[in-house]
């Protein structure tokens, strides 16, 4: 199967170049193909931009156990619609992914459901170091330092030390200090005001946990990735961190702030909590300056009925995979950033951090994971148009410029002008490490 994309504006980390790109079977065959190249399908893409498929390294697709909110099929379809061609999913499902057997079961299940490529973290507990050492078919180890329940909460120092000292896979963590959260909650007392969520899960909770994890990474020289940085103050910790420490920021921490509780209520309740306008600005500046490495969603859907429960019974988290790329393309439209920067933050950077083979770049021989975008397309996010099973978006009613038109995963078109394929095509991502 050969596909020729003619006159496309191809986006690389160092610039944009017009070219003809030939795909053959699952790979990019040529970045300099003649316009007359033989192909089964020809896409005349003049005026449109082609990016590598987006890699989202932090999603919660609720499968198994909580599939009334989302599942691997619906989550992967939402990814394809949004130009995400590879996702890495978290272990806090029911049952949790904390054993090698559970990891392999989830990988096998995904192959029967997903239309984009996938990987799954193995979760750390205070007692499963032997399982973490045995794990191979995974991007890395996820630790919940705060914001979890049961065995997935690891906040005792001895258990954290052992995980960093005795395992070899990269580690990533949710960094909120559990002791600080509990102390803040005790000080505030009983409350039904969702605005208190950001007072309970405050800047200090994030700073203490991030500092603690970075120090463990430094002590054991262990690769470590800080998930969903939510405060501008954490940038100083990242600046002083060893070079093997990387970080990310999510769209809700770039675009929402505590004043948004007034209009959106529990729809913007998340962990780590949204912070101030000043934090929005500081995180943007950190991203633009290279102090934060990549972008990710932390897609964490719940039903609207669940989110409508009075705080604190309302669950934390929000859906975002299908609007992730449009939200950032709109920032390109507004002059906040450039397309090459998006490719670095959303494609090349995640592939580098997680050592994902043959993804994240427009390169000959790489997987033909591609998204064709129209920077001039104007469209409004609406709850009723969401592909995610939960059926809503915190950005409902927001009009954006710049939308994906077509998505390819390993050479197969999985989304085209509003239509998604139905049969599974996704494949387990490969992680290449020394």
Image: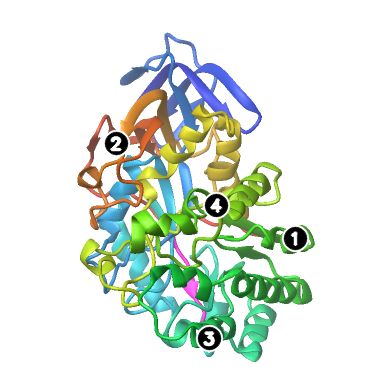
Q: Residue at x 40, y 17 (%)?
A: 45
Q: Which residue is mark 1?
A: 236
Q: Which residue is mark 4?
A: 356
Residue 50 locus on image (x, y percent): 47, 27
On the image, numbered disc 3 is attached to which residue? 187
Within 10 angstroms of label 4, few (less than 14), some, or many (20 or more) residues? many
Q: Earlier in the sequence, mark 4 or mark 3?
A: 3
Nearer to the camera, 36 or 338: 338
Mark closest to the chain's N terminus, 4 or 2: 4
State the scheme by which the image is colored: rainbow
Disc 3: CA contacts within 10 A as few (<14), some (14-19) or many (>=20) = few
Identify the mark nearer the N-term, 2 or 1. 1
- Rendering coords of residue 5 (x, y %): 41, 20
Q: CA distance from mark 4 to mark 1?
A: 28 Å
Q: Are marks 3 and 1 in contact (CB under 8 Å)?
A: no
Mark 2 nearby-residue class (10 Å; few <14, some 14–19, many ≥20): many
The mark that comes first in sequence, 2 or 3, is 3
Q: Give the number of the disc on residue 29.
A: none
Q: Residue at x 40, y 20 (%)?
A: 4
x and y, in percent, of residue 365 in the image = 53, 35
Task: Determine whether the residue tagged by mark 3 lies in a helix, strand or loop.
Answer: helix
Check whether the beta carbons of the residues at disc 4 and disc 1 lie within 8 A of each other: no
Sequence-wise, the earlier of marks 4 and 1 is 1
Cα separation between marks 2 and 3: 50 Å
Q: Please tell me whether residue 219 is drawn above or below residue 11 in the rendered image.
A: below
Marks 3/1: CA–CA distance: 28 Å
Range of residues picked out in magenta: 119-125
Q: Residue 270: name its quadrant.
A: bottom left
* Distance CA(mark 4)–CA(mark 2): 23 Å
Position above or below: 396 against 43: below
Q: Nearer the viewer, residue 196 or 381?
A: 196
């Amino acid at each position: 199967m050969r596909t020729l994309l003619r006159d496309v504006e191809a986006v690389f980390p160092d610039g944009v170049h017009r070219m003809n790109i030939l795909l053959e079977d699952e790979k990019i065959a040529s970045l300099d193909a003649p316009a007359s190249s033989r192909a089964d399908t020809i896409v005349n893409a003049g005026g449109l931009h082609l990016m590598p498929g987006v890699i989202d390294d932090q999603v919660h697709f609720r499968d198994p156990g909580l599939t009334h909110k989302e599942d691997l099929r619906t989550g992967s379809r939402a990814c394809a619609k949004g130009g995400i061609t590879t996702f890495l999913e978290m272990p806090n499902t029911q049952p949790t992914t904390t054993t090698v057997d559970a990891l392999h079961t989830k990988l096998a299940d995904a192959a029967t459901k997903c239309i984009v490529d996938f990987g799954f973290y193995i979760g750390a507990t205070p007692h499963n170091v032997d399982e973490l050492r045995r794990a191979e078919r995974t991007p890395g180890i996820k630790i919940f330092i705060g914001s979890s329940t049961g065995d997935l909460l690891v906040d005792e120092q001895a258990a954290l030390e052992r995980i960093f000292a005795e395992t070899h896979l990269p580690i990533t963590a949710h960094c909120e200090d559990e002791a600080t959260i509990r102390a803040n909650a005790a000080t505030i007392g009983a409350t039904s005001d969702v605005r208190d969520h950001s007072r309970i899960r405050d800047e200090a909770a994030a700073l203490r946990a991030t500092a603690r994890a970075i120090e463990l990474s430094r002590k054991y020289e262990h690769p470590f990735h800080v998930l969903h940085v939510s405060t501008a103050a954490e940038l100083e910790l990242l600046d002083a961190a060893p070079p093997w420490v990387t970080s990310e920021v999510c769209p809700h921490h770039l675009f929402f702030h505590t004043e948004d509780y007034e209009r959106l209520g529990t729809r913007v309740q998340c962990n780590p909590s949204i912070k101030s306008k000043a934090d929005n600005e500081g995180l943007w500046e950190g991203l633009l300056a290279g102090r934060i490495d990549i972008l990710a969603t932390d897609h964490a859907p719940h039903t609207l009925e669940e989110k409508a429960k009075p705080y604190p019974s309302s669950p934390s988290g929000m859906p975002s995979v299908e609007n992730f790329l449009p939200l950032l393309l709109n920032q390109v439209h507004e002059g906040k950033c450039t397309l090459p920067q998006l490719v670095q933050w959303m494609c090349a950077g995640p592939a580098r951090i997680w050592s994902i083979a043959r993804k994240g770049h427009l390169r000959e021989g790489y997987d033909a994971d591609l998204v064709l975008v129209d920077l001039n397309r104007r469209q409004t996010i609406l709850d009723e148009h969401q592909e995610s099973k939960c059926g809503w978006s915190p950005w409902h009613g927001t009009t954006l410029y710049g939308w994906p038109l077509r998505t390819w995963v390993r050479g197969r078109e999985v989304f085209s002008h509003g239509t998604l394929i139905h049969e599974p095509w996704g494949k387990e991502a490969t992680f290449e490490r020394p």
